[in-house]
Image (cartoon, rainbow, N blue to C red):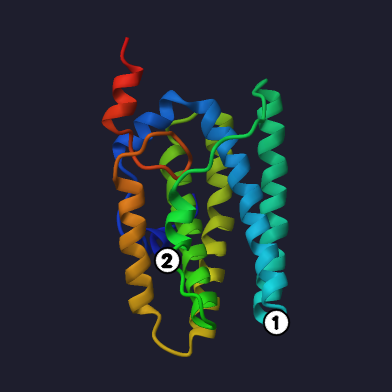
Protein backbone atom coordinates (compact mmCIF):
# COMPACT_ATOMS: atom_id res chain seq x y z
CA UNK A 1 0.00 0.00 0.00
CA UNK A 2 1.29 3.45 -0.91
CA UNK A 3 2.23 5.67 2.03
CA UNK A 4 -0.30 8.51 2.14
CA UNK A 5 0.77 10.00 5.47
CA UNK A 6 1.48 13.35 3.77
CA UNK A 7 -2.07 13.36 2.41
CA UNK A 8 -3.56 12.63 5.81
CA UNK A 9 -1.40 15.29 7.44
CA UNK A 10 -2.57 17.85 4.88
CA UNK A 11 -6.28 17.18 5.29
CA UNK A 12 -8.13 18.89 8.15
CA UNK A 13 -9.96 15.73 9.29
CA UNK A 14 -10.57 12.08 8.34
CA UNK A 15 -13.66 10.94 6.49
CA UNK A 16 -16.51 10.39 8.99
CA UNK A 17 -17.42 6.80 9.78
CA UNK A 18 -21.05 7.62 8.93
CA UNK A 19 -20.02 8.41 5.34
CA UNK A 20 -18.18 5.10 5.04
CA UNK A 21 -21.26 3.27 6.31
CA UNK A 22 -23.34 5.18 3.74
CA UNK A 23 -20.92 4.13 1.02
CA UNK A 24 -21.43 0.48 2.01
CA UNK A 25 -25.13 0.93 1.26
CA UNK A 26 -24.67 2.56 -2.18
CA UNK A 27 -21.93 0.68 -4.09
CA UNK A 28 -23.39 1.46 -7.52
CA UNK A 29 -23.67 5.20 -6.89
CA UNK A 30 -20.14 5.16 -5.49
CA UNK A 31 -18.77 3.73 -8.74
CA UNK A 32 -20.89 5.92 -11.00
CA UNK A 33 -19.89 9.09 -9.16
CA UNK A 34 -16.27 7.94 -9.12
CA UNK A 35 -16.39 7.84 -12.92
CA UNK A 36 -17.86 11.34 -13.01
CA UNK A 37 -15.16 12.58 -10.64
CA UNK A 38 -12.37 11.23 -12.88
CA UNK A 39 -13.92 12.90 -15.93
CA UNK A 40 -14.37 16.20 -14.09
CA UNK A 41 -10.81 16.08 -12.81
CA UNK A 42 -9.50 15.72 -16.36
CA UNK A 43 -11.74 18.54 -17.58
CA UNK A 44 -10.61 20.84 -14.75
CA UNK A 45 -6.96 20.25 -15.60
CA UNK A 46 -7.52 20.88 -19.32
CA UNK A 47 -9.51 24.05 -18.63
CA UNK A 48 -6.67 25.38 -16.50
CA UNK A 49 -4.22 24.59 -19.30
CA UNK A 50 -6.28 26.76 -21.65
CA UNK A 51 -6.66 29.57 -19.15
CA UNK A 52 -3.02 29.68 -18.02
CA UNK A 53 -1.12 29.01 -21.24
CA UNK A 54 1.86 31.13 -20.10
CA UNK A 55 2.68 28.83 -17.17
CA UNK A 56 4.97 26.07 -18.52
CA UNK A 57 5.23 24.17 -15.24
CA UNK A 58 1.43 24.07 -15.01
CA UNK A 59 1.10 22.88 -18.61
CA UNK A 60 3.55 20.02 -18.06
CA UNK A 61 2.05 18.84 -14.77
CA UNK A 62 -1.62 19.17 -15.68
CA UNK A 63 -1.22 17.61 -19.13
CA UNK A 64 0.14 14.47 -17.46
CA UNK A 65 -2.54 14.66 -14.77
CA UNK A 66 -5.38 14.99 -17.30
CA UNK A 67 -4.19 11.92 -19.21
CA UNK A 68 -4.08 9.88 -16.03
CA UNK A 69 -7.55 11.01 -14.97
CA UNK A 70 -9.00 10.03 -18.35
CA UNK A 71 -7.31 6.64 -18.13
CA UNK A 72 -8.90 6.17 -14.69
CA UNK A 73 -12.25 7.22 -16.16
CA UNK A 74 -11.95 4.52 -18.80
CA UNK A 75 -10.98 1.95 -16.16
CA UNK A 76 -13.97 2.78 -13.97
CA UNK A 77 -16.29 2.65 -17.01
CA UNK A 78 -14.98 -0.83 -17.78
CA UNK A 79 -15.60 -1.88 -14.19
CA UNK A 80 -19.16 -0.55 -14.34
CA UNK A 81 -19.81 -2.58 -17.48
CA UNK A 82 -18.41 -5.76 -15.95
CA UNK A 83 -20.80 -5.27 -13.05
CA UNK A 84 -23.80 -4.47 -15.27
CA UNK A 85 -24.12 -1.03 -13.70
CA UNK A 86 -25.50 1.64 -16.02
CA UNK A 87 -23.31 4.76 -16.23
CA UNK A 88 -25.74 7.65 -15.95
CA UNK A 89 -25.96 11.30 -15.01
CA UNK A 90 -25.91 12.20 -11.32
CA UNK A 91 -26.42 15.54 -9.69
CA UNK A 92 -23.17 17.06 -8.50
CA UNK A 93 -22.29 17.11 -4.83
CA UNK A 94 -21.91 20.43 -3.03
CA UNK A 95 -18.21 19.73 -2.46
CA UNK A 96 -16.21 21.19 -5.35
CA UNK A 97 -18.44 24.22 -5.89
CA UNK A 98 -18.51 24.79 -2.15
CA UNK A 99 -14.75 25.31 -2.35
CA UNK A 100 -14.44 27.08 -5.69
CA UNK A 101 -17.03 29.74 -4.93
CA UNK A 102 -14.58 31.19 -2.41
CA UNK A 103 -11.65 31.52 -4.83
CA UNK A 104 -10.38 35.05 -5.34
CA UNK A 105 -11.31 36.80 -8.57
CA UNK A 106 -8.03 38.63 -9.31
CA UNK A 107 -4.83 37.01 -10.49
CA UNK A 108 -2.55 35.45 -9.44
CA UNK A 109 -4.72 34.92 -6.35
CA UNK A 110 -7.38 33.05 -8.29
CA UNK A 111 -4.85 30.66 -9.82
CA UNK A 112 -3.27 29.96 -6.43
CA UNK A 113 -6.67 29.34 -4.84
CA UNK A 114 -7.76 26.98 -7.62
CA UNK A 115 -4.52 25.03 -7.24
CA UNK A 116 -4.98 24.75 -3.46
CA UNK A 117 -8.55 23.56 -4.05
CA UNK A 118 -7.23 21.01 -6.54
CA UNK A 119 -4.78 19.77 -3.92
CA UNK A 120 -7.57 19.38 -1.36
CA UNK A 121 -9.84 17.51 -3.78
CA UNK A 122 -7.07 15.10 -4.80
CA UNK A 123 -6.01 14.59 -1.19
CA UNK A 124 -9.57 13.84 -0.08
CA UNK A 125 -10.03 11.42 -2.98
CA UNK A 126 -6.83 9.63 -2.01
CA UNK A 127 -7.85 9.44 1.66
CA UNK A 128 -11.28 8.07 0.78
CA UNK A 129 -9.88 5.42 -1.57
CA UNK A 130 -7.60 4.25 1.24
CA UNK A 131 -10.51 4.15 3.69
CA UNK A 132 -12.80 2.35 1.25
CA UNK A 133 -10.32 -0.24 -0.04
CA UNK A 134 -10.59 -2.66 2.91
CA UNK A 135 -14.41 -2.40 2.93
CA UNK A 136 -15.22 -3.18 -0.71
CA UNK A 137 -14.90 -6.40 -2.72
CA UNK A 138 -11.47 -7.71 -3.67
CA UNK A 139 -11.40 -6.40 -7.25
CA UNK A 140 -12.47 -2.91 -6.29
CA UNK A 141 -10.19 -2.89 -3.25
CA UNK A 142 -7.16 -3.71 -5.42
CA UNK A 143 -8.10 -0.91 -7.78
CA UNK A 144 -8.50 1.64 -4.99
CA UNK A 145 -5.08 0.71 -3.61
CA UNK A 146 -3.68 1.06 -7.14
CA UNK A 147 -5.06 4.61 -7.37
CA UNK A 148 -3.40 5.83 -4.18
CA UNK A 149 -0.01 6.57 -5.75
CA UNK A 150 -1.37 8.68 -8.61
CA UNK A 151 -3.88 10.53 -6.42
CA UNK A 152 -1.14 11.40 -3.92
CA UNK A 153 1.07 12.62 -6.77
CA UNK A 154 -1.76 14.78 -8.14
CA UNK A 155 -2.14 16.33 -4.69
CA UNK A 156 1.59 17.07 -4.62
CA UNK A 157 1.49 18.53 -8.15
CA UNK A 158 -1.30 20.96 -7.31
CA UNK A 159 0.24 22.01 -4.02
CA UNK A 160 3.67 22.46 -5.57
CA UNK A 161 2.27 24.67 -8.34
CA UNK A 162 0.36 26.76 -5.79
CA UNK A 163 3.58 27.30 -3.84
CA UNK A 164 5.48 28.14 -7.03
CA UNK A 165 3.06 30.77 -8.30
CA UNK A 166 1.97 32.38 -5.04
CA UNK A 167 5.06 34.49 -4.41
CA UNK A 168 4.18 34.34 -0.72
CA UNK A 169 3.34 31.89 2.06
CA UNK A 170 0.27 29.89 1.03
CA UNK A 171 -0.32 28.71 4.59
CA UNK A 172 -3.15 31.16 5.34
CA UNK A 173 -5.02 30.24 2.14
CA UNK A 174 -4.53 26.53 2.77
CA UNK A 175 -5.93 27.00 6.27
CA UNK A 176 -8.90 28.97 4.90
CA UNK A 177 -9.88 26.33 2.36
CA UNK A 178 -9.12 23.48 4.77
CA UNK A 179 -11.71 24.86 7.18
CA UNK A 180 -14.27 24.98 4.38
CA UNK A 181 -13.35 21.46 3.31
CA UNK A 182 -13.78 20.13 6.83
CA UNK A 183 -17.33 21.49 6.95
CA UNK A 184 -18.19 20.02 3.56
CA UNK A 185 -17.12 16.50 4.53
CA UNK A 186 -18.41 16.47 8.12
CA UNK A 187 -21.71 18.39 8.00
CA UNK A 188 -24.86 16.40 7.12
CA UNK A 189 -25.64 15.91 3.43
CA UNK A 190 -28.84 15.04 1.57
CA UNK A 191 -27.38 12.87 -1.22
CA UNK A 192 -24.63 10.27 -1.24
CA UNK A 193 -21.73 11.14 -3.51
CA UNK A 194 -18.03 10.34 -3.52
CA UNK A 195 -17.24 13.69 -1.89
CA UNK A 196 -20.43 14.17 0.13
CA UNK A 197 -20.73 14.60 3.86
CA UNK A 198 -22.42 12.06 6.15
CA UNK A 199 -26.17 11.45 5.82
CA UNK A 200 -28.43 14.01 7.45
CA UNK A 201 -31.63 13.40 9.36
CA UNK A 202 -33.78 13.94 6.27
CA UNK A 203 -31.92 11.19 4.41
CA UNK A 204 -32.12 8.87 7.39
CA UNK A 205 -35.86 9.42 7.70
CA UNK A 206 -36.41 8.79 4.00
CA UNK A 207 -34.58 5.47 4.25
CA UNK A 208 -36.72 4.19 7.13
CA UNK A 209 -39.45 1.61 6.29
x 51%, y 57%: residue: 122
The residue carrying pointer 2 sits among few (fewer than 14), some (14 to 19) or many (20 or more) residues within 10 Å by Cα, namely some
The residue carrying pointer 1 sits among few (fewer than 14), some (14 to 19) or many (20 or more) residues within 10 Å by Cα, namely few
In the rendered view, does 60 fall on the left or right side of 96? Answer: right
Most distant residue in the bottom direction: 167
Contact, mark 2 vs mark 1 (Cβ under 8 Å) = no
Q: Which is closer to the viewer, label 2 or label 1?
A: 2
Examine the rendered structure and indicate whether residue 21 appears above or below residue 5.
above
x 72%, y 49%: residue: 71
Return the disc, 2 or 1, that comes first in the chain's sequence: 1
In the rendered view, does 161 fall on the left or right side of 23? Answer: right
- Residue 135 has which mark? none
What is the C-alpha distance between the residues marked 2 and 1?
26 Å
Element assignment for label 1: helix
What residue is pinned by disc 2?
A: 102
In the picture, which quadrant includes the C terminus? Answer: top left
Q: Position of residue 34 (x, y in %)?
A: 57, 40
x 35%, y 38%: residue: 189
Q: Position of residue 204 (x, y in %)?
A: 30, 24
What residue is pinned by disc 1?
A: 56
Residue 162 makes an appearance in the image: yes
Q: Position of residue 3 (x, y in %)?
A: 45, 57
Q: Position of residue 66 (x, y in %)?
A: 69, 59
Element assignment for label 2: loop
Residue 137 makes an appearance in the image: no
Amino acid sequence: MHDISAVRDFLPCPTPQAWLDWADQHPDILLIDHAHCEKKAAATAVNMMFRYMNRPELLDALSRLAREELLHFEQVLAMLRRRDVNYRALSSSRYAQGLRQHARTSEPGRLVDLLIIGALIEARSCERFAALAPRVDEELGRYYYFLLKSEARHFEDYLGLATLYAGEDIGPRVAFFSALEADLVTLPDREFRFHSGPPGEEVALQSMP
